[in-house]
Image (spheres, rainbow, N blue to C red):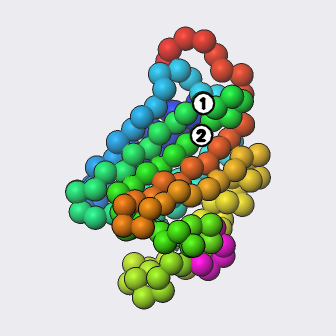
Amino acid sequence: REIDLVEFLDGIIERFEMLEKENIVLSRSFPDSVIPVQLDTDKMTQVLDNIISNAMKYSPEGGTITASVTIIGRKVKVSISDEGVGIPKNNVSKIFDRFFRVDRARSRDLGGTGLGLAIAKEIVLAHGGDIWAESEWGQGTTIHFTLPLRKVKEGQR
Ligand code: ATP
Ligand code: MG
């Protein structure tokens, strides 16, 4: 289905804002233009739900989570950044592996199975995109993923 990515992301973030969890601020940095993408909205909701709920799980009280959208050539990049605990450098690429969790004890307390990002990766790849993480231990984490762009229409929403 062809949809406007910005409108879709707005809807997802608004749902998280209604949960009003632990004083975490959600901030958005989206372009003004319509970003047409072809996607399975149920599956992409699952991807974003996991990435955003991870960001919330590992964020301190009062932390900011920023969602941004950038167009890079014929792709659109979605980035979700947090100011949380971060991931040790040697583990950054492993978080997309099935059942991988950085610190078993820490992760056990926070719940979950370690499958969320493995499923997210599968879904993003099936959409013709890519997914990766950037993280600084103790500073925060950004999960980036790309999607192929449909022809961008001129004009503002
Ligand atoms: P599930 O998603 O199945 O409920 P989970 O959240 O532990 O469980 P993933 O979403 O696959 O599993 O994430 C894998 C691991 O990567 C997490 O256990 C955590 O150690 C680390 N991780 C993921 N996102 C973040 C983040 N934003 N900040 C710090 N660590 C993260
Ligand atoms: Mg998860």
Q: CA distance from mark 1 to mark 2?
A: 6 Å
Q: Is residue 116 visible?
A: no
On the rendered structure, is 110 left or right of 3?
left
Q: Is residue 138 visible?
A: yes
Image quarter of residue 152:
top right
Task: Residue at 47% x, 69% y: name it.
Answer: 87
Image quarter of residue 39:
top right
On the rendered structure, is 108 left or right of 21?
right
Dot 1 crowding, Cα within 10 Å, few <14, some 14–19, many 20+? some
Q: Nearer the viewer, residue 153 or 145?
A: 145
* Above-or-below relation of 32 to 2: above
Task: Residue at 72% x, 60% y: name it.
Answer: 122
**Residue 40 lies within the magenta run:** no
Q: What amino acid type should be assigned to the residue bearing mark 1?
A: Ile
SS class of the residue under badge 1?
A: strand
**Residue 97 lies within the magenta run:** yes
Q: What amino acid type should be assigned to the residue bearing mark 2?
A: Lys
Image quarter of residue 52:
bottom left
User: Which labelled disc corresponds to residue 71?
Assistant: 1
Where residue 65 sits in the image (x, y, percent)? Answer: 37, 51
Q: Are marks 1 and 2 in contact (CB under 8 Å)?
A: yes
What quarter of the picture does the N terminus occupy?
top right
Task: Residue at 28% x, 56% y: name it.
Answer: 63
* Above-or-below relation of 97 to 70: below
The chief SS type of the magenta part is loop
Range covered by the magenta-colored residues: 96-100
* Above-or-below relation of 70 to 98: above
Q: Nearer the viewer, residue 18 or 143?
A: 143
SS class of the residue under badge 2?
A: strand
Dot 2 crowding, Cα within 10 Å, few <14, some 14–19, many 20+? some
Q: Which residue is mark 2?
A: 77
Where residue 156 sits in the image (x, y, percent)? Answer: 50, 14
